[in-house]
Amino acid sequence: MLIACAACGSSTSTTATAPTSTAPFTITDLTIGTGATAAVGNRITVAYTGWLYNTANPDGKGTQFDTSTSTLFTLASGNLIAGWVQGIPGMKVGGQRRLIVPPELAYGTSGSGSTIPGNATLIFDITLLNVQ
């Protein structure tokens, strides 16, 4: 899993190419949940999919680099990329949110492994499953 922590890995070994463009940090609620609200410091469970941003596609989704159906973590700096720490608070359980995360709020100039190149803008579709 590439986004939850630096110590986690991905089973894919393909090499990603740089995205064609960057985009501003964007938070879009796809579905508003009705359960508990996530806040920084909470332990939360999410399902998500991540893609490299690519302007050649109408939805901006390029190569998919990660997906998970149930991941538990603490919503805090140091555990996650800054785009998640800024983009998830306020979500309610059952909600779905799309984050477009520029490089400075993701993995910066270094990227992550072979699947996320440096200076990559990322897109995440996130469903909040639980807040503890």
Image (tube, rainbow, N blue to C red):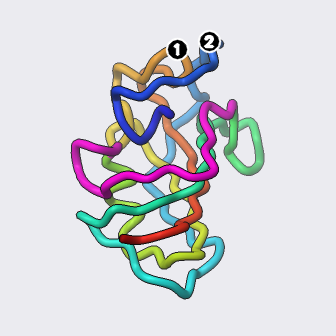
Instruction: Inspect the magenta stretch and tell me whether residue 67 lies in it.
Output: yes
Q: Which residue is mark 2?
A: 13
Circles 2, 1 touching at the beta carbon (< 8 Å): yes
Q: Which residue is mark 1?
A: 114
The residue segment tinted magenta is: 63-81
2 or 1: mark nearer the eye: 2
Q: Nearer the viewer, residue 126 or 56?
A: 126
Left or right: 41, with 131 as reference point: left
Tag 2's secondary structure?
loop
- Placement of 37 over or under 2, stated as above or below: below
Instruction: Inspect the magenta stretch and tell me whether residue 120 lies in it.
Output: no
Instruction: Locate the C terminus and report the quarter of the image it occupies.
Output: bottom left
Residue 17 at x, y percent in the picture:
60, 17
Q: Nearer the viewer, residue 98 or 34?
A: 34
Tag 1's secondary structure?
loop
Q: Main secondary structure of the magenta part?
A: strand
- Which residue sits at x=24%, y=64%? 41
- Which residue sits at x=56%, y=21%? 115
Left or right: 10, with 74 as reference point: right
Residue 32 at x, y percent in the picture:
58, 81
Label ID, residue 101: none
